[in-house]
Structure formats: C-alpha cells, structure tokens
Image (cartoon, rainbow, N blue to C red):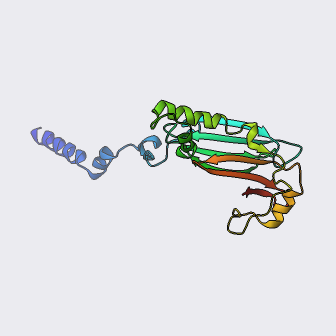
C-alpha cells in the first residue's frame, strides 16, 4: 500500500514539471492596441500662434482717389511694437481690387524727428513725445497732403542725380500731361519730404522729386 502511494506521488510530480505545462503557465496575454501604440512626443519647437493685431498701437486709414479716377484707394499707416516711441509704422496703399500697390516701413523716430521744430524748450517729456507721434499718425492722410495735378505743367524734369529711383523722364512727362493725376506727400525724419504718384504708363507707384 505504501508502495502504491509513493508511485502515485511520483507520477503527480512528473506531470506538474512537464515542459508543456510550464509553457502554458508562463504565456502572457497580448496587450491591447492602445497600450502598444507609441505616443508622439510633444512638439516644443513649433512656434506659438501669433496674433497680428496683438502689438498694434495706432492705426490711421483714409480713402482717396489715387491709382484710379473712378475708385478710391485705401491709404493705411499702422504702428506696431512695444511702445509708441520705439515702434514700426507700415505705410501701404491698396487699390480697389485689394492689391497692395505701395508699401514702406517707417520707424517711430522717423515720425517724431520733426518735433524739434515745434518744441518750446530744449527737451520734451515722454508724454509730449508720444502725443506728437500720435498726432503725426492721426494727420498723416490729411487732405492737404494730396495734390492735384501730381506734376505741375511748369515743373521741369530733375537732373539725373536728383531724380528719385524708379522715375524716368517718360513717366514724368506722362504724369505732367494728366491734370487729374494725384500725388501724396509725407514727411520722414526732420526734412525728408517725399511724394508718390501712380504712373499709368509704368503701371506702378513712382517717387516724385
């Protein structure tokens, strides 16, 4: 009886230690798809969304006949930056079709410099300087700055050394023959008086002397 019991225990031990049973007991269940999918790392190099209007300080706009006798163009001056005295002002002219036909960038010092001729003392406060820049922008497109005709009949074509870049004699003479042509005049810095006009001959804005 003891022999039969010993044989039974030995047979049970062999069955428990068989390779098939060990392999079955160590087999792992497959992981779900969500666990095996690698997550993409966060993109820390992607630039943050920028609001084009966030740093806009001052804006002046005016509609005036310029490149067309039938439809007015939009003249715009937008000052952007961290402060009125250190900003950057973008001057644009956009025609009735929405095309920007002229663009120039001015600085706050460009707008402030002429204040020296209006100061009552040797210095000006920051508030006075800011007020002057604001006034310059507010009056930038005053009616007095638009002239017609763009080129008076009595005007003479400037010498080559004085002619603005992009202006040739043919475009000048063509404008001179157009009494309805309009020029826009503006001051940059202390004494740099600039003028632009639309040249129907060249199909672009040209600088006038």
Closer to us: 5 or 13: 13
Give the percent coordinates (x, y) of residue 174: 86, 60
Q: What residue lies at 21% left-to-right and 48% top-to-bottom?
A: 14
Q: What residue lies at 80% left-to-right and 53% top-to-bottom?
A: 198
Give the percent coordinates (x, y) of residue 149: 84, 49
Q: Is residue 46 above or below residue 85?
A: below
Q: What residue lies at 52% left-to-right and 45% top-to-bottom?
A: 109
Give the percent coordinates (x, y) of residue 54: 55, 35
Instruction: Name the residue at the bottom extreme.
Output: 160
Which quadrant is the C terminus positioned in? bottom right
- Horizontally, residue 171 falls left or right of residue 85, namely right
Q: Is residue 158 above or below residue 198?
A: below
Closer to us: 43 or 41: 43
- Horizontally, residue 55 falls left or right of residue 163, namely left
Q: How many numbered markers are drawn? A: 0
Q: Is residue 154 visible?
A: yes
Which quadrant is the N terminus positioned in? top left
Q: Is residue 57 visible?
A: no
Closer to us: 146 or 102: 146
Give the percent coordinates (x, y) of residue 30: 41, 44
């Amino acid at each position: 009886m003891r022999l039969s019991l010993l044989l039974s225990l030995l047979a049970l031990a062999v069955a428990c230690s068989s390779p098939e049973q060990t392999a079955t007991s160590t087999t792992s269940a497959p992981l779900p798809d969500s666990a095996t999918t690698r997550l993409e790392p966060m993109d820390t190099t992607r630039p943050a969304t920028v609001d084009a209007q966030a740093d806009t300080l001052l804006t002046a706009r005016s509609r005036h006949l310029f490149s067309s006798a039938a439809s007015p163009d939009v003249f715009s001056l937008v000052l952007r930056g961290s402060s009125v005295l250190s900003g950057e002002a973008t001057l644009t002219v956009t025609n009735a079709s929405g095309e920007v036909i002229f663009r120039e960038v001015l600085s706050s010092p460009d707008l402030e410099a002429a204040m020296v001729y209006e100061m009552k003392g040797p210095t000006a406060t920051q508030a006075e300087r800011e007020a002057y820049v604001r006034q310059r922008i507010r009056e930038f497109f005053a009616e007095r700055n638009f002239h017609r005709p763009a080129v008076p009949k009595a005007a003479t074509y400037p010498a080559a050394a004085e002619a603005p870049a992009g202006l040739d004699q043919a475009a000048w003479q063509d404008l001179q023959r157009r009494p309805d042509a309009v020029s826009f005049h503006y001051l940059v810095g202390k004494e740099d008086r600039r003028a632009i006009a639309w040249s129907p001959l060249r199909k672009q804005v040209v600088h006038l002397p």
